[in-house]
Amino acid sequence: MPKFKPYDYNQSAMIVINYEDQLQPGTFEHAIHHLIDKRIDLSAFDVNYQNDDGGRPAYDPAILLKIILFAYSKGITSSREIQWCCESNVIFKALSCDTVPHFTTIASFVSSYPKAIEKLFEQILLVCHQEGLLGNQLFAIDGCKISSNAAKEWSGTFKELEQKRDKIKRQIRHCLKEHRKLDKTDPDQKQQIQRTKQTIDTLDKAFERIDQFLKTSAPRMGQGKRPKEVKSNITDNQSGKMTTSKGTIQGYNGVATVDKKHQIIIDAQAFGEGQEHHTLQPVLETVKARLNTLGIRKDIFKGRYKPIITADTEANMEYLHSNKVDAYIPDNQFRSRDPKFQDQKTKYGKRHQTKPENQKRKVIPASEFNFDPVSMICICPAGNKISFRGERPDENGNPKAYFEGKLLQCRNCTIKDKCMQNPAAADHRKGAGRQVSFLLEHKREPNYTDWMKHRVDSAKGKQIYSHRMSVVEPVFGNITTNKRLNRFSLRGKQKVDAQWKLYCMVHNIEKLMNYGNIAAR
């Protein structure tokens, strides 16, 4: 028989632990402990406590911050799990001095003090500056779309929500009818009657929830050039429905401004819209105000040593030009103009190999039409002169000439199946022929987009913009993959913004731990 070492669970042992010895220099927990105790002023949290003369003593904000930041660094966002860690994990015990805050206290602390958390973010940024981790030479701005604590099934325009409410009302009527029928014909079927009653109660709650939202809320409007209604969400109406590479989510866009030198996040904001073209201006204004308040630079975007700004979306070019911001922001056709990317699709393949069912079929493009901008004449590929329908500006304000084929021409055309999306439209007397439009370049005045195109298409612009991805994308990879932030646990823009700043603080503290002098203290 093999021999094993004996063991006995029914025994006692005394283990002596010094909690401060568990916080070893060079570790993340030590960096948090040192920063909060020695370098950070937490008086911004004091105004929220009113128990000076009486009442129960509260947990020190320093204790709560330490365990929350350490938990976020390990990918733990659940307040219940943080409480359990304070009961069972020695590092959490050391950071909390062997106290166990209730999960409601932890959850309330994260969601109740957004302004104090912003002050904390700024103080950690100031420490990064004092440690020499900011270069202030290039700032890369980008957004990371993350799911929120709201189901996208509860999203829709007001018309769609009204239709959903009416559908639920019809379901309630049907269930009530079945319930009365069972009650009369077969009263012994108690389980089925109970299930029907539960279904009615569930549908009633859903109906009341939608009905109350429609009565108390207004349609949510987008922030495009032509504002139109976007989908509202009953659970969290400040979140937005966003399209990502992994599908459509209901969430927030966490925007970060990252300094190139050591990838320090100098600004972090959460927006409830997926489009980023309107976020650049408020982000730059916040960065300018914050660095001025902290005494780092009076006006960061002016002077001889102003930083370069890179982003990956079109923005308010007029704002950038008028404020003389040294920015490089490409448009959607940036790569198509670059000869280096001509063979990209052939070499690496297209992103979407399968053709969606609702995708428009390919027809003869407008470039195959012979358009004379001087005489305003357009000849279709079949050799027919089509009618001029006038000039008007497009959504970007650029003048365009619009043409439409005559019904008899398109109806009897031999190539209408190749030329028109819906060839049957020409067969009806109230239908329409092929429609095309052309940009009138000779009438278009130079705009701010042309100014930015000239900058990003230059050799210097391409070299500068090539740094953007290597600066900001590793930051999002660290937060979403290493720290496992794949879903915000709070609701409401203000609370989500605070949670996003806490995660960005974790990233900055790691940089201080690795490149600052905190590890040696």
Image: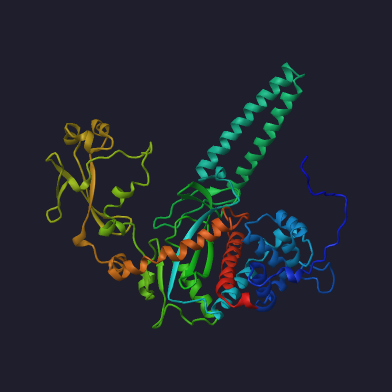
Q: Position of residue 48 (x, y in %)?
A: 72, 70
Q: Residue at x 63, y 77 (%)?
A: 520
Taking 508 as reference, is 366 above or below it?
Answer: above
**Residue in front for this viewpoint, 187 or 485:** 485
Kindly give the residue lying farthest to the right in the view shown.
11
Kindly give the residue lying farthest to the top in the view shown.
185
Q: How many marks?
A: 0
Q: Residue at x 71, y 54 (%)?
A: 81
Quarter placement of the C terminus = bottom right
Residue 86 image-quadrant placement = bottom right
Taking 79 as reference, is 186 above or below it?
Answer: above
Q: Residue at x 34, y 57 (%)?
A: 332
Is 187 left, or right, of 170 in this rendering? right
Residue 408 shows up from this direction: yes
Q: Position of residue 347 (x, y in %)?
A: 30, 49
Is 281 left, or right, of 341 in this rendering? right
Q: Position of residue 369 (x, y in %)?
A: 17, 46
**Residue in front for this viewpoint, 464 or 177:** 464
Q: Position of residue 142 (x, y in %)?
A: 46, 62
Residue 327 image-quadrant placement = bottom left
Is 90 left, or right, of 72 in this rendering? right
**Residue in front for this viewpoint, 27 or 405:** 27
Quarter placement of the N terminus = top right
